[in-house]
Amino acid sequence: MVKRVRGSRTGRPIMVLLDLLGRRWTLRIVWELREEPRRFRELQDAIGASPTIINTRLAELREAKLVRLDEEAGYRLTALGEELLRLFLPLHVWSEKWAKAI
C-alpha cells in the first residue's frame, strides 16, 4: 500500500522517511537517544518541547520501527534507528566543515 506524505504523490520510501525526519523535533529525539536510552522526562528536559509533541514524535518513531520503549530503561533506538544514525554521522562531520567555511 502506498503511503501518501507531504510533497510526494508516489509514497516512495525515501519520501516517507524524509517526511518523518523533517517533522519538528524528530531528528533531535533520535540524536538524544544516540548514546543511551532515556526516559520521557529526560527527553523532555533535553529537548524542551511540549509533552504532547514529544509523545506524538515518539509514537511516529515507534511506528516507523526506529525507536522502541524498554519498560525499565526508557526509549531507545532500534537496530534500524542505530543504522539511520550511523548514516547521518558523515553528514554531521561534513556539516562541521561547512559551518567553518561559511
Image (spheres, grey):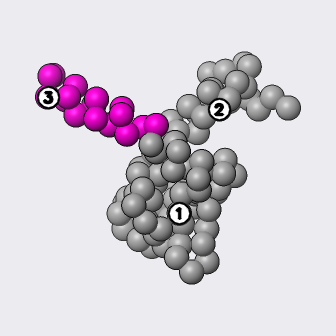
Eye-nearest disc, 2 or 3 = 3
Q: Which residue is mark 2?
A: 16
Q: Amino acid at mark 2?
A: Val
**Sequence-first tag of 2 and 3:** 2
Q: Amino acid at mark 1?
A: Arg
Residue for point 55% across, 49% down:
81
**What are the residue bounds of the magenta stretch?**
87-102
Are the two marked residues, 2 and 1, in contact with CB atoms closer than 8 angstroms?
no
Residue for point 14% across, 22% down:
101
Disc 1 from disc 3: Cα separation: 32 Å
On the question of residue 49 being in view, the answer is no
Q: Which residue is mark 3?
A: 100
Q: Assess disc 2: are there few (<14), some (14-19) or many (≥20) residues with their C-alpha within 10 Å of its C-alpha.
A: many
- Check disc 2 and report its element: helix, strand or loop: helix
Are the two marked residues, 2 and 3, in contact with CB atoms closer than 8 angstroms?
no
Residue 70 position within the rendered picture, expressed as x and y whole percent measured from the top left: 60, 72
On the question of residue 70 being in view, the answer is yes
Give the overall secondary structure of the magenta segment. Answer: helix
Q: How many marks?
A: 3
Relative to residue 82, is residue 4 drawn left or right?
right
Disc 2 from disc 1: Cα separation: 21 Å
Disc 2 from disc 3: Cα separation: 32 Å
**Sequence-first tag of 1 and 3:** 1
Residues 88 and 42: in front is 88
Residue 9 position within the rendered picture, expressed as x and y whole percent measured from the top left: 72, 19
Residues 19 and 64: in front is 64
* Looking at the image, residue 64 lies above or below residue 44: above
Relative to residue 10, is residue 78 drawn left or right?
left
